[in-house]
Image (spheres, helix red, strand yellow):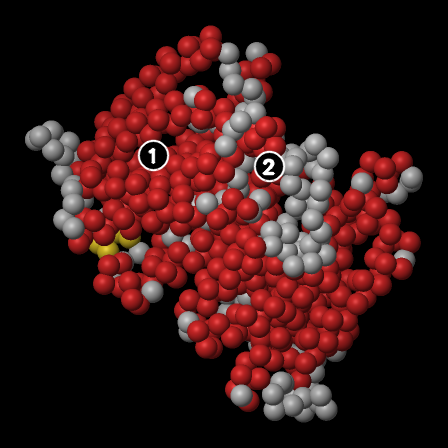
Amino acid sequence: MNEFLHQLLAGLATGGIYASVALALVMIYQATHHINFAQGEMAMFSTFIAWMFIQAGLPYWLAFAATVVVSFVLAAGIEFVVIRPMHRAPELSVVVVFIGLLVIFHSLAGWIFGYTIKPFPSPFPADAWFASPLMSAHEVGAIVVALLMVAMLFAFFRFTPLGLAMRAAAQNPASSRLVGIRVGRMLMLGWGLAGAIGAVAGMMVAPVVFLDPHMMTGVLLYAFAGALIGGIDNPVGAVLGGFLVGVLENLMGTYVVGTELKLSVALALIVGVLIVKPSGLLGKKIVTRV
Amino acid sequence: MNTTTSSLPMGAPAPAVSARRAMRWPWVLLAIALACGLLFVLKGYQLFQATMVLAYAIALLGLNMLTGYNGQISLGHGAFFALGAYAAGILMEHAGAPYWATVPAAAVVCLAVGYLFGRPALKLEGLYLALATFALGVAMPQLLKYKHLEAWTGGVQGIVLIKPDAPFGLPLTQDQWLYVFALGVTVVMFLIAHNLLSSGTGRAMRAIRDHAMAAEAMGVDNRHYKSMTFGVSAAFTGVGGALSAIAVQFVSPDSFTLFLSISLLVGIVVGGVGTLWGAFFGAIFIMFVPNLAEQVSKAAPWAVYGVVLIAIMFAMPGGVMGLLNKLRARA
């Protein structure tokens, strides 16, 4: 029983990371209706930037803040330079551009920072008061950070005029433009936010899996699954889906099929859920007039 | 996901007028003649590369049928490529089948598996289908490594195959014969694809892509056509996989990673979504650009690859065929 609890909680901890990346995916999806396949690699790159700051002697939280800002600017810049010119292109071409971004970030990170695996510090001391035999301080911290992010985002979208403008720009760009919302700027902001969220997720996952260019490949996959299972247009659903996928993956790996097949089985389960409930657990069913 | 407006690809411009179609035949014959000519120009490794281009072209044709003509996105077609390759490998290794018989066998296996996958996947659209196929692409290498299947698949080590000799005492080297064989298969597959796509079936497939509900209202059986397209598409990709297995003389789970699936998707987009001949340009791209990128920069070849990819999408969002069609329209 104790073992089961342990696995369950460990699943929740990794789920928190999937949830954060899923949240970043949902951010960009809501704004542009694209799935950013490069999200994981962008987060990995941000984590390397954080590592660089820490190596330069900055205290952790200062490096954290600086990384979030840099990632925000970087992601917004990518939207402006690479994605915006493609807004008329067919959807699949945009997907290919994302794949291009993915390999560029992956390759650049390896080139600049090297392929050796690096340790990354955790901001939560191992002997913190919230650490317990069942969950390490970092695991608790990662979950809290993920929940905090979704709460902040929820508040941002729900209660601020800027959040309202962003939602409007995503839902109906033409009408939003007519009421004076700068849609392009909103998209850039959405990308920036996604970049920042991804950076936080990267810094939370790095102490667990260690830092190297391959760090986020699997995470992105799970996050994608989490976002879809929760409903791609719903941030709360995405976070829930992320946690669910984390728990499922851990329990499957431990009790059912062993580690070699756990990814396949987890994905098969997710697809099974989607076949029964095609728009995700909390997703809106979109009805269109023909 | 929006359920009605098909946001997926835009495909080729409306089917060409028959006069233009008649004009195409000389070009096709010229292309075949050129391909035959390559037989005497290229040597050893280059011939192998040319054979691989043909194998990829068939696989891309299959994916393009599904994604370009039917509007169903697949991020996991590498799985069918792997399945075709393994079907060929296992039949040659364990059943002693001749190499030429493995190609249709691979087609049949992939047709069945593709149909069985496409049937439940009917409910999924757009991104959700992308995820389901993605899962397939991820699961396939793991399944091939699975220890209870090792007796058949050879596990991580894979299967080593023997290169066939030219039959009937033809004065060709093994590489040359293989190229001729692949060329023959390619011509047949393209002929099948061309006829299928210009028949009523092809029209039904395109109608589903453009407006599923309208197609249904006109009496197109969406469920049947969509899952059948999945099967046929998988069969084409499987044939490509079988050819590549015979050419490489080796199958192993690690040759069929997710990267292959992604390369296939990149291939159809670079060639031109919803076009028949785009498959060749896409195949040339996925065969040669990674090598070229490595020559440009040893340190970060994939960064070069990514930049080339993005540049191509900027310059010709409709792929090579999109650009050619645009030029032709202007001329």
Q: Secondary structure at mark 1?
A: helix
User: Which of pointers 2 and 1 lies earlier in the amino acid sequence?
Assistant: 2
Q: Position of residue B275 (x, y in %)?
A: 48, 27
Quarter residue A50 falls in:
bottom right
How many other residues sit within 10 Å of disc 2, few (<14), some (14-19) or many (≥20)?
some
Residue B305 visible (yes or no): no
Labels 2 and 1 within one chain:
yes
Q: Is residue A76 left or right of residue A9?
A: right
The residue at the point 63 percent across, 85 percent down is A136
Label 1 marks a residue whose chain is B
Q: Residue at x 65, y 71 (%)?
A: A16
Q: Nearer the viewer, residue B300 or A229?
A: A229
The nearer-to-camera label among 2 and 1 is 2
Compared to residue B81, the image places residue A48 above or below, namely: below
Q: Residue at x 28, y 31 (%)?
A: B185
* Kind of residue sitting beneath label 1: Leu
Q: Position of residue B42 (x, y in %)?
A: 27, 32
| Residue at image point 71% right, 42% down | A287
Q: Between residues B324 and A60, which one lies in front from this camera angle?
A: B324
Q: Is residue A142 above or below residue A26?
A: below
- The amino acid type found where label 2 is placed reads Leu
Which secondary structure lies at badge 2?
loop
Disc 1 crowd rating (10 Å Cα; few below 14, some 14-19, many 20+) is many
Gap in angstroms between the C-alphas marked 2 and 1: 27 Å
For the question of whether residue B93 can be seen, the reply is: yes
Residue assigned mark 2: B8
Q: Quarter of the image containing the C terminus of chain B?
A: top right
Viewer-closest of B126 and B272: B126
The answer to whether B243 is drawn above or below residue B22 in the figure is below
Quadrant hosting residue B52 = top left
Mark 2 chain: B
Q: Which residue is mark 1?
A: B54
